[in-house]
Amino acid sequence: MTTTYELTHLRGLEAEAVHVFREVAATFERPALLFSGGKDSAVMLHVATKAFWPAPLPFPVLHVDTGHNFDEVIEFRDRTVRRLGLRLLVGSVQDDIDAGRAVERPGAGRNRLQTGTLLRSIAEHRFDAVFGGARRDEEKARAKERVFSFRDEFGQWDPRNQRPELWHLYNGRHRQGEHIRVFPLSDWTELDIWQYVLDEGIELPPIYYAHRRTVFERDGMLLATNPHLSPSEDEQPHEATVRFRTVGDATCTGCVPSTARTAADVVAEVAAARVTERGATRADDRISEAGMEDRKREGYF
């Protein structure tokens, strides 16, 4: 009698991510996990806790904070940290602005300023591996990433200077001052994320689900009014039922009309979508065709 053991699609992705987490924990001295409170980082954290259960997470979580946050996301971040007993480190963009290390341009979002804060945080804490929740289906530049993404002593990414990953064998060798960005969710899609959220009952910030909010239209995108963003005189605010497909800097993250109030509703909605969440709702990605790749070369996530 032959016994076969087959994993479902999602369990296969989960097993791959668990393997990546354990590989990093075994081969790096000072890893950290980027945790913003968004859906991808929440799923990544959930898988990480499963990878090391019943032991606590063997590394801290790091939030690179623009200071332009949705209140619901920060509340969820802090509640999750308390619930899991995590060590939270916060790299503040505002601190870098106050210290003169970063210059804020009037009317511009702070996403680009995150790069310097991230690199400073990595250097200060001497992290040699940093987990990120980026997925290859999000954007063209991210599709070029390896699971283990090598960064030089300046924190920069060169897509031509990456290591092969045949048979899921990962090379984390690096010199002092260099580090590796690790992307356990590389092979997941937005639909995979939401199906996993549904199956695992993972809590997310409520703004990922349909709710009433005051919004206005700018450049074909719905933006929410908030303490950091207000409509101009020719932009008319109005109430609408919307949800956010991704969350980030509140000054450049848009929302979409939606009636999806549960994870099951969102699964059905995403299955019918034909535009990625970043393409539909991130104004900072519309700067140029190569905008994300340029930022990644500078050290962005």
Image (cartoon, grey):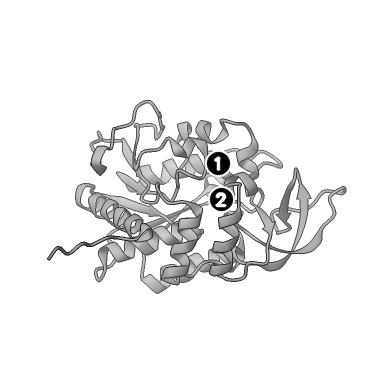
Quick check: 205 above or below 285? below
Residue located 61% across and 44% down the image: 279
The picture quadrant where one finds residue 169 is top left
Residue located 84% across and 50% down the image: 235
- Towards the viewer: 55 or 63: 55
29 on left or right of 228: left
The picture quadrant where one finds residue 148 is top left
Judging from the image, what secondary structure is the residue with disc 2 in?
loop
Q: Quadrant of the C terminus?
A: top left
State the CA–CA distance, disc 2 to disc 1: 8 Å
Q: Which x, y percent locates residue 56?
A: 28, 67
Q: Dot 2, how many residues are within 10 Å of its Cα: few (below 14), some (14-19), or many (20+)? A: many
Q: Are marks 2 and 1 in contact (CB under 8 Å)?
A: yes
Q: Dot 1, how many residues are within 10 Å of its Cα: few (below 14), some (14-19), or many (20+)? A: many
- What residue would you read off at disc 1? 113
Which label sits on residue 263?
none
Q: Earlier in the sequence, mark 2 or mark 1?
A: 2
137 on left or right of 269: left
Quick check: 157 above or below 197? above
Kind of residue sitting beneath label 2: Thr
Judging from the image, what secondary structure is the residue with disc 1 in?
helix
132 on left or right of 163: right
Kind of residue sitting beneath label 1: Leu
- What residue would you read off at disc 2? 66
Q: Which x, y percent locates residue 12?
A: 32, 56
Q: Which x, y percent locates residue 187?
A: 40, 48
Quick check: 255 above or below 143? below
Q: Quadrant of the N terminus?
A: bottom left
Q: Which x, y percent locates residue 175?
A: 25, 33
Residue 226 visible in the displayed image: yes
